[in-house]
Image (spheres, rainbow, N blue to C red):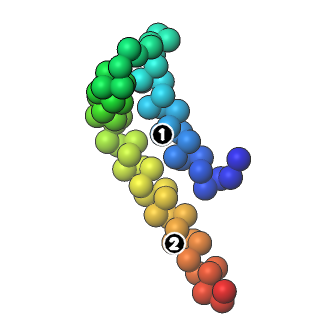
């Protein structure tokens, strides 16, 4: 697993847990989409801020190494 993807995979895991909690299954695409939207709204804003800052810091560390390419 690449370290660059860990944060996004963590977010994906959180969303999957919220969507499929209690082994929930969906009868329609609409029901699934609605549940995904609700799960997204339930993700704490502090977590998303930390995720964005982490990604920004990784990009800022990466860009200087790309100048010579």
Marks 2 and 1, how far apart at CA:
21 Å
Q: Residue at x 49, y 58 (%)?
A: 55
In front of the other: 56 or 30? 30
Nearer to us: label 2 or label 1: 1
Q: Position of residue 3 (x, y in %)?
A: 65, 53
> Which residue matches tag 2?
60
Q: Which mark is residue 38?
A: none
- Is residue 18 rendered to the left or right of residue 42? right
Q: Position of residue 66 (x, y in %)?
A: 62, 81
- Is residue 44 rendered to the left or right of residue 11? left
Farthest right residue? Answer: 1
- Is residue 44 rendered to the left or right of residue 12? left
Farthest front residue? Answer: 28
Q: Is residue 35 visible?
A: no
Quarter of the image where the C terminus is located: bottom right
Image: 24 above or below 45? above
Q: Position of residue 18 (x, y in %)?
A: 42, 24
Q: Secondary structure at mark 1?
A: helix
Image: 58 above or below 46? below
In front of the other: 59 or 26? 26
Image: 16 above or below 26? below
Q: Tell me the crowding category of disc 1: few under 14, some 14 to 19, or many 20 or more residues within 10 angstroms, Cα based.
A: some
Q: Residue at x 52, y 46 (%)?
A: 8
Q: Residue at x 60, y 87 (%)?
A: 67
């Amino acid at each position: 697993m690449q370290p660059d993807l860990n944060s996004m995979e963590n977010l994906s895991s959180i969303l999957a847990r919220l969507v499929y909690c209690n082994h929930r299954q969906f009868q329609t695409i609409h029901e699934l989409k609605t549940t995904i939207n609700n799960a997204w709204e339930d993700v704490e804003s502090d977590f998303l801020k930390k995720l964005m800052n982490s990604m920004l810091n990784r990009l800022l560390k990466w860009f200087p190494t790309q100048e010579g390419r």
